[in-house]
Image (spheres, grey):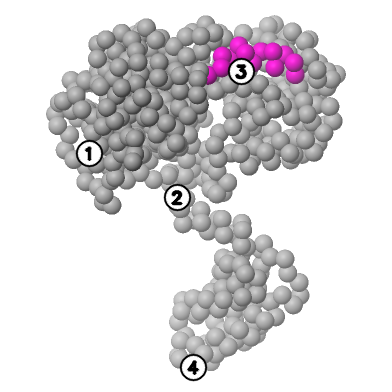
Amino acid sequence: MNSVSRAVAPASPAVPVLPADALRVVAFGGLGEIGRNMTVFEHAGKLLVVDCGVLFPEEHQPGVDVILPDWSAIRDRLSDVVAIVLTHGHEDHIGGVPYLLRERRDIPLIGSRLTLSFITAKLAEHRIQPVLTEVKEGETLDVGPFGLEFLAVNHSIPDGLAIAIRTAAGLVLHTGDFKMDQFPLDRRITDLRGFARLGEEGVDLFLTDSTNADVPGFTTSERELTPAIESVFRTTQRRVIVSSFASHVHRIQQVLDAAHAHGRKVAFVGRSMVRNMGLATDLGYLTVPDGLVVDAKTMDRLPPNKVTLICTGSQGEPLAALSRMAAGTHTITVGEGDTVLLASSLIPGNENAIYRVINGLTDLGANVIHKGNAKVHVSGHASAGELVYCYNIVQPSNVLTVHGEARHLRANADLAISTGLPRERVLVAANGDIIDLHDGRALHTGAVDVHNIYVDGDTVGGVTEASLAQRRTLGEEGVLTVVALIDTDTGRLTEDPDILARGFEHHDTTFTTLTPALEKALAGAAERNITDTTRLEHLIVRETERWARKLFRRQPVIIPVVIEA
């Protein structure tokens, strides 16, 4: 028996009419996955978007750069969007904004100082000048029919915000990504007093971060990592190379402090790392002692025991600096005695890529320090104990678990129920599910179609599941191009076909048995008066597939080329 309420949408779900005094909530990403967070609130004919991030591809999605939320259900209503509210500056919450603004450039962006700084720099690369409204914790703002209040939350990046949304339908509290670190590096704690005050007012719908809901207890404080990081710098005889998210300001501050204490210089490697840390420094979120950070050319003149490099690539991204170092294709060469510190969490789905990088660096002689063998990372998300604490102080009427894979969403729902919430008031939804808040009740009322929107270079949405399947086949099974010169009068081959193979281990006699098979099939087609080029191409594909399956037990992509002689 399920412990939570979960709707099963019909195959072609209808979108119900929203009552005038109701609030609609639809997630276009972020449910059932770690990333591409985007939630749309609808009330009184207007739309409010909270976050618009990206999801990073897994190995079964070759060639994909990022995956966007699918906002096609509101594409014809973009004029109704009153604002995009950004809870914080991580890519899984802001990375999709440039693509949404391509479709309507004047949608106002609301966020904290650091978050808006990061997104403005990103939008400059897309040649988009945004409309910005900077806010901070404790402030309120009215946009259309939505009254917004912003509360401080602690996360793995500075300036995170929770959002309280007031409408005629009720009060919603959206935590964003958060945890309850009582000793944060920036001394900015989650505003639990504000959460409790809203609870006294009456929270009708509580959207809670689920990423760590299946982890018992409380998330470790960032300060507890300092001894492990300091140990790396104390014991390493040559270079220290640190890999982190380009937005992980807190962790990079700890690395800078350790490098300074041990007399090392620091260089940032990678465009996004250089850009973001420059912005964080200029805005005062990163404290950098004079002379500590130098450029890469200066590093080349320093002895190895005075060098610290901070780069991207902690998730094994193929084009990131650390991955190229591991593959030996970067200008920076990793060698014996270097220590590589992976200072970010392992995102589900990236395990193989990350361990491939770790193994590559190990083969080069580096000592690799990561979460699995040292205390060098803590999560930015609330664990079970913190979530229960929040449910008890907020005491919401309804809960919608957000931000996480299915196991996280359900674990979070179970926590809410354990605090006394009726199970029918705790909702676990999928991307596209419609949740309507009306007369104090939040209910599943339908669904809209939501798909993965793939970005491949300059192409947005052009890559489909079918084309990804073909890419996987090309990578795993190979490709055969069969060029057949056919006599138009007889329908027979005028000479042996040319066969071009990729992804096959072959020698001079590999394809000798294919030619007679094709000759026989084409002869049979000629006897049946089949001369249409398209039909002959289908015949060649079918016969070649049969041959490859029998001889190699493989299913390559077959490309037929019929030339009339």
Magenta segment main secondary structure: helix
Which type of secondary structure does the marked residue at label 3 adopt?
A: helix
Binning the other alpha carbons within 10 Å of mark 3 as few (below 14), some (14 to 19) or many (20 upward) gives many
Query: Does residue 349 sit above or below 527 in this rendering?
Result: above
Counting from the top left corner in percent of width and height, residue 233 is at: 76, 16
Total marks drawn?
4
Q: What residue did someone put label 1 on?
A: 445
Q: What residue did someone put label 3 on?
A: 251
Between disc 3 and disc 1, the foreground one is 1
- Identify the amino acid type marked 3: Arg
Counting from the top left corner in percent of width and height, residue 341 is at: 70, 25
Q: CA distance from mark 4 to mark 3?
A: 74 Å
* Nearer to the camera, 288 or 485: 288
Between disc 1 and disc 2, the foreground one is 1
Quadrant of residue 139 within the rendered picture = top left
Q: What residue did someone put label 4 on?
A: 527
For the residues labelled 4 and 1, say whether their Cβ atoms are less than 8 Å apart.
no
The residue located at (29%, 13%) in the rendering is: 199
Residue 228 among magenta residues: yes
- Identify the amino acid type marked 4: Glu
The residue located at (39%, 10%) in the rendering is: 192
